Amino acid sequence: MAAAETVPADEPAVRDIEIYAPQSGSLPVYGWRQAPTGLATRRQLREQRLRPGGQDPVAVIECRGGKRRAWLYEIARALPIRPMTLAKEAALDKAMSKRQTCPSCSRRYYHCLPLRSLGCCLECHDGTPASPGTYISPPAARHAA
C-alpha cells in the first residue's frame, strides 16, 4: 500500500488555529509585536509616508491584554500620502485657529487651549502670566481715519 492511499483525500489540511481570533473568523488577531512582516498600522504607515489607500484591514493587533486593538494593513498595497496643498493648509490653519485663540483676549497661542474646561487661556482664567513667546498678539484695531 502506498503512503497516498493511507490518507483519505477528503480529509482537511491541518491548519494553525488562532485562539484569540473572533468567532466569525473574519480577520486574524495577533498579539503585541507578533504581527508578520509586511503589515502595519495606520500610524506605522504614516511614519513611512504611506496611507491605506482604500484597502480594507487584513488583520487586527491586540495589546494591553485585549483592551486595545489596531487594524493592520498591507504595506505593499499602501499608497503614498497626498501632498499638502495651499487649500488644505488654509483649512487646517482655520480649524486650528479656533482651538488656539482665546475668546476673551483674542490672543492666538502656539498650542491648543483648554476651551472646554476653562473656556479661555490661563491668563484670562486665573491670572497666570503667559510667556510672550507662546502667543501671537491680536491685531491692532483699525480705525478709518
Image (cartoon, grey):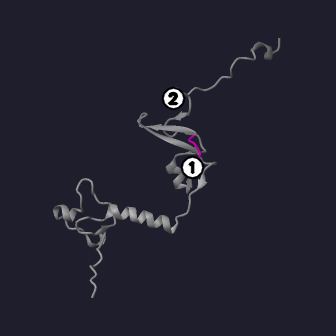
Residue bearing mark 2:
22
Depicted 19 relative to depicted 46: above or below: above
Comparing 107 with 46, the one in front is: 107
Specify the quadrant that holds the N terminus.
Answer: top right
Magenta stretch: dominant secondary structure: loop
Are there few (<14), some (14-19), or many (20+) residues within 10 Å of tag 2?
Answer: few
Residue to which mark 1 is pinned = 52
* Residue 25, quarter of the rendered image: top right
Dot 1 falls on a residue whose secondary structure is loop
Residue under the point 52% across and 35% down: 30
Q: Which amino acid does label 2 sit on?
A: Pro
Question: What residue range appears in magenta?
Answer: 53-57
**Which residue occupies the foreground of this view, 35 or 96?**
96
The answer to if 43 sits in the magenta stretch is no
Real-space Cα distance between discs 1 and 2? 23 Å
Q: In which quarter of the view is residue 96 placed?
A: bottom left
Which corner quadrant holds the C terminus?
A: bottom left
Within-10-Å neighbours for mark 1: few <14, some 14–19, many 20+: many
Question: Of the residues shown, which amino acid type is indicated by label 1?
Answer: Pro
